[in-house]
Image (cartoon, grey):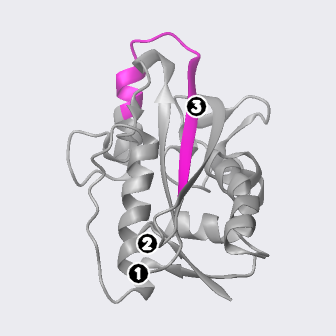
Amino acid sequence: MTDLLIATSNPDKVREITALLNGLPYALRTLNDLSQHLNVEETGHTYRANATLKAQAYAQASGLPTLADDSGLEVAALNGLPGIRSARFAPHVQASDADRRTYLLENLRSHPRPWTARFVCMVCLALPSGDLHYTQGICPGEIVPEERGANGFGYDPIFYLPERGCTMAELSEAEKNLLSHRGRAIQAMRPLLQRVLGK
């Protein structure tokens, strides 16, 4: 069975990606399985660049095919912010997900609703040979001023899906994996993995 490394230290992402790759004949490895730790700075100016940095670094260090993603929330009223800085969109370094949601809402208070937004995810598959493959997923929606739902993470409790009448955090994990930006990017990656790594 082929080993496939998931290059993220975020346990929520690991859980989502593992569920999305269910049924494929790969042994999924995480950063905890490696005897070494890399500190890969996300210095890129695009999701693609950041996903590439992470995937390449871990593929080269581990010798394994590696999946990495970079994702963000883009809010129209804020000219696309927080974008690639979504995980660092708060005044202080140790900010929690709740802190980032509060800070985002503070920045939106003076703007008229609806606060249209979208989640974007770029996934990179890096092979030890140096070959790179990409897929992208986008999920449109809007930001709402009150948190709703106890599932998900990040901005999910304030990201509203008009066609479903609920926030991302009110979806079950299975529903989220069908609709989310990461879900769409990983689903698009499945046939590519089978073609590149074999079935």
Could you tell me which residue is drawn at 73 percent across and 28 percent down? 162
Asked if the residue at tag 2 contacts the one at tag 1, i.e. Cβ–Cβ closer than 8 Å, the answer is yes
Q: Residues within 10 Å of mark 2 (few under 14, many from 20)?
A: many
Q: Which residue is mark 1?
A: 62
Could you tell me which residue is drawn at 62 percent across and 64 percent down? 16
Q: Earlier in the sequence, mark 2 or mark 3?
A: 2
Q: Which residue is mark 3?
A: 118
Nearer to us in this view, 47 or 115: 47
Give the distance between the C-alpha atoms of the residues marked 1 and 2, in whole angstroms.
5 Å
The magenta segment is 104-124
SS assignment at label 1 = helix
Could you tell me which residue is drawn at 40 percent across and 38 percent down? 46
| 93 lies above or below 167 | below
Q: Amino acid at mark 2?
A: Ala
| 168 lies above or below 66 | above
Q: Amino acid at mark 1?
A: Ser
Q: Is residue 33 left or right of residue 165?
A: left
Determine the image quadrant of residue 104: top left
Q: Amino acid at mark 3?
A: Arg
Q: Is residue 147 visible?
A: no
Determine the image quadrant of residue 78: top left
Q: Which residue is mark 2?
A: 59
SS assignment at label 2 = helix
